[in-house]
Amino acid sequence: MYRNMTLEELARHIGIDARVVRKWAEKGKLPGQLIGGEWRFNRATLLDWLQQKMHTLDEQHIRNLERAMREGADNRLIELYLATEAVEMNLPAYTRASVLRELVRLAERTGLVYNGPEIVAALEQREAMGPTALPRGLAFPHPRRPLAYATAEPVVCLARVPQGVPFGAPDGQLTDIFVLVCAPDDRLHLGLLARLAMMFNSDLPDALRQVDDSRAALELMLRKEAEVVARG
C-alpha cells in the first residue's frame, strides 16, 4: 500500500513543483533516499512528515496540496463532514487524555462511529509520535493512519475547552480549540488537514472563542470555508 515514489510522482501527488521538492530533499527538509542517483520517497514516511510539518509550509504550498488531494471532488469538505451535533463549545476535559476521549464521545453523537476505542487508541498513538498542537491555542488531533472501518463516513468534530489544557504546543501555550479529523483514506485525510490549516490561518480562532452556541460556531466554520474556496 505504501510504496516508494519517484521525485516526479511525489511532486504530482502533493501538487508541489518538482524543483521545490528536489530542493527540500537535497536540504534534508523532506525525508527521502538517493538510490542510484535518483530520489525515492516512502509514501508512509511522507504521510507522517506532511501531518507533522504541514503548518510550517507557506500558504500557497498548502493550497496546492489541498487541491491535489481533492482532485475535483466536492469543495465543501467541512460542510460535508462537520455536523452540528459534532460541535461542542464547552468540552468537559482537563488533560490531553481526557480531551481525546471526549472528542471521540463527541464524534459518537453523529451515529457514524463504529469503534470508538480504536479511534481513541489511534489518537493516543499519534500524539505519542509528536503533539498535534499548533501555535495560537489550536490542535487538529487525528490518527497517524486513516481508519477505514472505524466510522461509517468521514467525521470532523469541533470543540473548545474554555480553560485550555497543556497539549504540547510549540509556543508553550495552553490549547483550547480542537478539531478532530477521522477519514478513511490518505487523500481525504491530508485534504482535510490542509483545508483546516488554511481556514485557521485567519481570525477564525478568535471568532470561535467569542461564541458558546454550537450552531453559531458551525456557521463561523462554514463561512470561513466558503471564503477559502472562493479564493481558489
Image: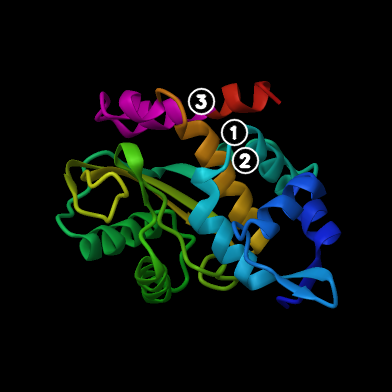
| Amino acid carrying mark 1 in the image | Glu
Q: Residue at image x 42%, y 32%? A: 218
The residue under the point 41% across, 48% down is 157
Circle nearer the viewer, 1 or 3: 1
Q: Give the magenta range.
A: 204-224
48 w.r.t. 207: above or below: below
| SS for callout 2 | helix
Question: Whole-percent x and y of residue 71?
Answer: 79, 46
Q: Badge 1 local density, few (<14 within 10 Å), some, or many (20+)?
A: some
Instruction: Tell me which residue sits at (45%, 33%) in the image.
Output: 200
Label 2 vs label 3, nearer the camera? 2
Viewer-proximal residue, 37 or 1?
37
- Closer to the camera, 42 or 85? 42
**Is 29 or 133 nearer to us in this picture?**
29
The quarter in which the C terminus is drawn is: top right
Q: Position of residue 172 (x, y in %)?
A: 23, 47
Residues at marks 2 and 1 touching, judged by CB atoms closer than 8 Å: yes
Residue bearing mark 2: 62
Q: Check contact, mark 1 vs mark 3: CB within 8 A.
A: no
| Residue 135 falls in image quadrant | top left
Query: Predominant secondary structure in magenta?
Result: helix
Q: Is residue 1 above or below residue 201?
A: below
* Residue topped by disc 1: 59
Q: Is residue 137 above or below residue 224?
A: below
Under circle 3, the secondary element is: helix
Separation of residues labelled 2 and 3 (CA atoms) = 16 Å
Question: Is residue 119 at all visible to an observer of this figure?
Answer: yes
